Image (cartoon, rainbow, N blue to C red):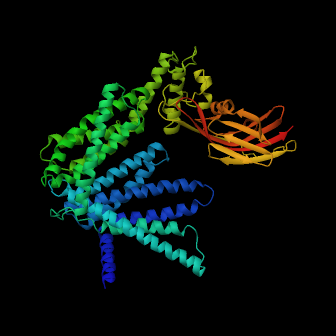
Amino acid sequence: MKLFDSFKKITIGIYTSIRRFPVPLLFSTFLAILLMILTKISTYPSRPIEEVLKRVAMAVALGIPLSLCARMLFEKRGKERQSRLIVYSLGSAILPILYYFFFLKDLNMVSVTRYIGISLALYLAFIFIPYLGDRKNFEIYVLKLFTGFLVTYVYSAILYAGLSAILFTTNKLLGVPMESEIYVYTFLTVALIFAPAYFLAQVPKSKEDLSPMEYSKVFKVLLMYILMPLLSVYTFILYLYFGKIIVTMQWPVGLVSHLVLWYSILLTIVLFFIHPMRNENKWIKGFSQWAPLMVLPILLMMFVSMGIRIKAYGVTENRYYVFVLGLWVLGIMIYYAITKSKKNIVLLVSLSIVLLLSVLGPISSYSIANHSQNKRFSTVLKENSMIEGNHIKPASHNISKADKEQISGILHYFETQHDLKGIKYLPQDFKIENMEDIFGFAYTHPTSPVENEYFYLMIEENHKLFEISSYDYLYRFNSYLNKSQINDEVIDVILQSDSNSIIVGYEGIEIYQKDLTPYINKLYETYGLPQGTEAIPSEEMTIIDENDRLKVKLIFHNIEGQKEDSQKIKIENMDVNILIKIK
């Protein structure tokens, strides 16, 4: 009976959800169908329709949070007239169509990040719309949604596992033929049809008042005795690091910004949830009062670190997002520190606004990054007297390597993230290959002071036959080990990746050794980034060498590695044919 009652309860909940949120569930069902079609199409060679379907699927997915927000607004206003519901349905359908034609013309960095930002802002709006105004217990409402999401996730995972087991057993034991994609279809059905319907059944109505309730014991233990102590210790460690910076006067760059940012975001979430029980004991009350103040100097350290990075390399979208999110956290911490009557809904409303401003309008990440990189580009050209009117003239002197790298880096950034047409002074038909004609020097791959540069060099696949008749032995192997060895009765071949060298032994005696570093350096400079995976002619991926004991021929199929901060090439993998002739 209990099983039947549980099943009945779930069925009633899903039915209620369908009646209350028909449009969002139609969108999610349509999305599931589109993704199933895409899954099937992806098994065939790439087709133009695949790109179109991806963009349609994104627009349909955007309709889910959009229609949820519209529904919550109607519920909040208490207007359930048929005419208003028709407007709600039509608006929810038309806006994704308009978004498809205006903002999803192509799938690139700008369109994808804008889509993510707008989607997140709409989902946040779905959460806070019912509590706009002077309503209490917002934290309880958010926790109820979060709990409902976790329960839905667990139920969906169990349902998918069970259905997959049934399909697998039916296929293997009963011999019923099934397509391999059936498991993907099952996942999409559970994730986009069952899960949304079950989750939305647990969403309280906009006018429903949630009475103050005690957090569960598990949740209180998580907050009070795990997260709050961990955050306190982490704060202490960051202060020690802050003191080290003051003593050494060496400001951090790179990783510290992300460490501080994610710590600050977690702290914000904890402060959000402990707000309703801030007067329960001294530990929570003290943490609520002092944590926002203690994090302010740490955030200042993060901004100084980011400022150093931005001054050196300008603003990019990633730096913009980290900086703006840091500003949002700073604003929230100041709000917590100086405001007595706090409303936690401010967190979600402000974050939603920040997300929209970051991807839309004149202060969006794209506008600011474009302006910043163009300013850097103009500055370095002017410093080297390379601007004549509104055009670039080739450098009349040998400009520094740093300036070459800076110009090349800006060009590479626009080529990969935006469009070269967005750079001032460039000819309309400019391509990276034309760089030497326009600038007077070839592309110079920028070196990073923080991160190693990874590269992958591969041979041109022309299925060419290699002449081996003049050799006694042929070996081919691929290894990610620092030392790779082939043992033969008379021949030992060792590839040492740590020293980029090949050693050949004959009857226990070393008869040949060669350092491959100069050769690989030359390949890297010619075919490394930004070209990345450009196929290299087989002649240039071949080394022929000999001494008085042997003749050796190396045919590299691919070389993979990284260029370290010290500019040293480090090989991580070599796939190579080795031909040996003993004299």
Q: Closest to the observer: 553 or 132?
A: 553
Q: Residue at x 55, y 67 (%)?
A: 181
Q: How many marks?
A: 0
Q: Closest to the observer: 83 or 220?
A: 220
- Percent x, y of residue 551: 82, 36
- Percent x, y of residue 362: 35, 36
Q: Residue at x 14, y 43 (%)?
A: 339
Q: Residue furthest bottom?
A: 1
In the rendered image of this protein, does residue 132 appear above or below residue 175?
Answer: above
- Percent x, y of residue 269: 27, 50
- Percent x, y of residue 526: 65, 31
One can see residue 360 in this view: no
In the rendered image of this protein, does residue 436 appear above or below residue 73?
Answer: above
* Quadrant that contains the N terminus: bottom left
Q: Residue at x 45, y 68 (%)?
A: 189
Residue 187 falls left or right of residue 74: right
Q: Closest to the observer: 415 or 556?
A: 556
In the rendered image of this protein, does residue 243 appear above or below residue 332?
Answer: above
Q: Quadrant of residue 142?
A: bottom left
Residue 378 falls left or right of residue 488: left
One can see residue 48 in this view: yes
* Quadrant that contains the C terminus: top right
